Amino acid sequence: MGRRLRETVKLSIGSDQISMELTIAAGLASSALLSFNLASILLASSRLKRRHVIAPPPSARPPVSFIVPSRGVEPFTPETLQRAFSLDWPRYELIFCVAHAEDPVVKLIDAAIARHPKIPARLLIGDDRVSANPKLNNCVKGWQAARHDWVILADSNVLMPRDYVQHLMAAWRPDTGLVCSTPIGSRPDGFWAEVECAFLNTLQARWQYAGEALGLGFAQGKSMLWNKPMLDANGGIQALAAEIAEDAAATKLVNGLGLKVNLVASPFEQPLGLRSFAEIWSRQARWARLRRVTFPLFFAPEILTGAAMPLLLALTAAASAGVSLPTTALGVLAIAYLPEWLLAFAKGWYLSPRSVTAMIVRDALLPAIWARAWFGGAVEWRGNAMTIRTKAMTELEELA
């Protein structure tokens, strides 16, 4: 009887010890993730500058060719078109690329070209199938037609400031192979557009700039400044077909040459307008799938970003320790979102009374988006069906 009692007591003590160890481990893991989150914000903040105007240099201003792939008419298309013709750079040409002549954006581009006869501009129509990436296919003819050594690939929905070229050129260094800018969401119309701002600004842009601070610069396809002779010497724009995403291929190509991808200090706006949940989900699922296929080792830890995982761990530890769950949740959310809100405020990015709620919804979606990226490859890009897979996967299927 005494032996059984002693064994029962030992088992109880052992169970309590294991429970305590798990509680401590969950609490430490939550603290580590929150600290990691704060460190990324501090790193990004050190690289980012609030929007400021850069005057054009008094001399040595090389001519620039713009390649602008376009598809369809969006709410801000007239404004983004006008901005492209209003840049504070003495010599530049605009090459608009559209895959199909019946696209409604053709009329808007033709009208803009007619209104600005002093700016060299052309509209090229056609589709060069060099890859499974419709955007890259649309850009090939523009690259071939570009007259200047400096070429900027600029998405049609980027709201270019007058000093757009200056910001890109200012980020070029002797060891640079490519300069990019992440899109900063602005002018959201409705709650789901604010969620998109939360994805673009204080999550994706933040981590991209934190990565650059650590020497892990990744390209972003929204705005890309290339030295044309350099890229032509290494396969030309067709070399960006090595991956399903042209920015992933650009990152690997530049790094393979021993050069760096640099980001502009003040990233450019992308006005959002109205967004629906379905649009947010589709876009984020596509981008996540692209990251998972092209950089799987960097994508895998993304499940740890955002507040969902540290909140879950903290609540687990609090429940085991008998600590108030509401108090714990409020503490974790404050530690997670106050620094994020301050980053947006300091850099002049969009904020509203609903911004923190949008950040919470974003982080609630992140685990589902992360899981979705590991399964299936069929996604849609502006009406184009795309099957996202690695080049090796495609080659194996062709051999089968």
Image: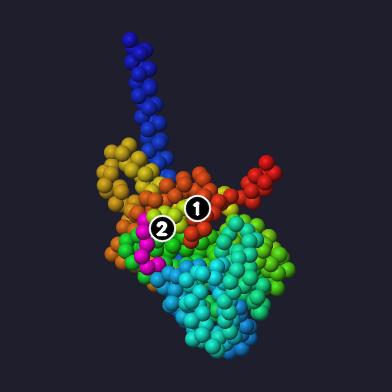
**Hey, which residue is sitting farthest right in the picture?**
233
In this view, the residue in front, 215 or 204, is 204
- Image vertical order of residue 266 relative to residue 134, above or below: below
Which residue in the structure is indicated by mark 1? 379
Q: Indicate left or right for 220 with 255 as reference.
A: left
* Residue 10 visible (yes or no): yes
Q: Position of residue 224 (x, y in %)?
A: 57, 70
Identified by mark 1, the residue type is Val
The residue segment tinted magenta is 272-277
Q: Position of residue 44 (x, y in %)?
A: 48, 64
Q: Are marks 1 and 2 in contact (CB under 8 Å)?
A: no
Q: Is residue 93 magenta?
A: no
Q: Residues within 10 Å of mark 1 (few under 14, many from 20)?
A: some
Which residue corresponds to the image point at 27% horizontal and 48% vertical from the top-left?
327
Which residue in the structure is indicated by mark 2? 279
Q: Residues within 10 Å of mark 2 (few under 14, many from 20)?
A: some
